[in-house]
Amino acid sequence: MTHSGHDHRAHGGCCSAKEAPSAADAVVRDPVCGMTVDPAAGKPTAEHGGQLHHFCSERCRQKFVAEPEKYLTAIDPVCGMSVDRATAKHFFRHEGQGFYFCSAACQAKFEAEPAKYLGDRPESRAMPKGTQYTCPMHPQIVRDKPGSCPICGMALEPMGVPSGDEGPNPELIDFTRRFWVSAALSVPLLIIAMAPMLGLTFQAFIDDRTKVWLELVLASPVVLWAAFPFFHRGWDSVLNRSPNMWTLISLGVGAAYVYSVVATLFPDIFPHQFRGHDGTVPVYFEAAAVIVALVFLGQVLELRAREKTGSAIRALLDLAPKTARRIGEDGSENDVPLDAVKAGDRLRIRPGDAVPVDGIVLEGRSSIDESMITGEPLPVEKPRRCFDRRHAQQERLADHARRADRR
């Protein structure tokens, strides 16, 4: 492996008049997936209309070459301006879909109230035929179609690394909608139920009997509609003989709601000690509704975190170089796919390049950023005849194995 004698640290109003960006402020972005790309990192490129576009991976480049007009510009969802996707400085991913903005002000408005600017959302793209699904918590569960994990009840996710173009997560969209409905109905329900404990009373407006019926009206959509996925997963856990979190939630919410409904409709079946002065029985509608709202809040936060984690994993994998610069026997240099590199080939590592394979430094010296592997923040000096530390460890293991064979 040949190094150049340079330092190559592989670093991986709303709208105002546009100004020509300076070299320091310029952004090079993959027009397909929206990731920022280092032009000196040797990533795939394609020319269209006299402009050179850079891509994070060969897959994105192929998509662009097939339909270049589809990925040239995007519409700012806030102000409606057309934005160049390859040089957009402001980009935000929401529910699996990337959005481009003409300015930081538009992006801030969108982040604060995304639903205000979304309008009709595109439907989730169908997964390729043959896609298998697994549970994030129990990888031994593999299914041929979406569903719930029979062990923990979590929604199954497609196996493999996220491609970045799956579209919005349908479960996240559904749970977000159910959360807002639950929260909107639970807040007044909680105020009505807890007001007496704070020294407040609504008896001047409604009596206790009417208040109980009002609680029933507010809690019923939360429990019967919003919480339906919880009861479905809870029932599945019983059928699969695998009690989990959804079993407890279903039992708790169901018991509180059913008891309260019976107490509202048939208060006379309860002993006299259970009833108040006006004949009403204490109910727990607010407990059932608030539990549902809080569980939805946790689920929405978890789904958003998992979505960002998938994007981060894809970004890390895309940092790996797809090609290497091989030196031929006659001294010529050519870029070849990484799969074509064989043991014994000589490779040229230019300033700013990522090291594609383990090897030995034959010429020159340089510093390499190994923070992605070792966590060391400072570049590591690589003099001549230096092994990559992972390669050296493999050589030691192989040497031990050879010695053991001789014995």
Image (cartoon, rainbow, N blue to C red):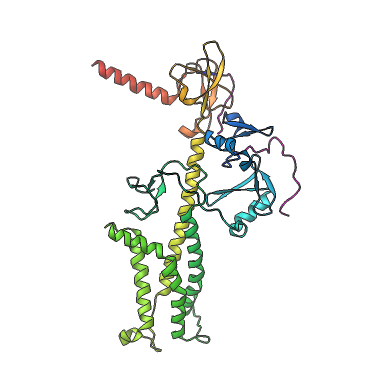
Residue 268 included in the magenta stretch of the image: no
Q: Is residue 197 visible?
A: no
Q: Residue at x 34, y 62 (%)?
A: 234
Residue 26 included in the magenta stretch of the image: yes
Q: Which residue is drawn at 44% across and 66% down?
A: 226
Residue 37 sits in quarter? top right
Q: Which residue lies furthest to the left in this view?
A: 407
Where 209 falls versus 359 (above or below)?
below
Q: Is residue 34 visible?
A: yes
Q: Total marks drawn?
A: 0
Q: Residue at x 46, y 82 (%)?
A: 211
Question: Is 333 displayed left or right of 283 in the figure?
Answer: right
**In x, y percent, where is residue 102?**
68, 48
Quadrant containing the C terminus in the rendered view: top left
Decide which of 194, 40 is in the foreground and name it: 40
Question: Is 233 displayed left or right of 60 in the figure?
Answer: left
Where 29 falls versus 380 (above or below)?
below
**In x, y percent, where is residue 377?**
52, 33
Q: Which residue is drawn at 31% across and 85% down?
A: 269
Question: Is 23 displayed left or right of 216 in the figure?
Answer: right
Q: Give the range drawn in magenta.
A: 4-29
Query: Which is the main secondary structure of the residues drawn in magenta?
Result: loop
Q: Which residue lies furthest to the top in this view?
A: 330
**In x, y percent, where is residue 279?**
38, 88
**In x, y percent, where is residue 143?**
35, 48
Where 143 falls versus 321 (above or below)?
below
Decide which of 400, 139 is in the foreground and name it: 139
Where 246 falls versus 311 (above or below)?
below
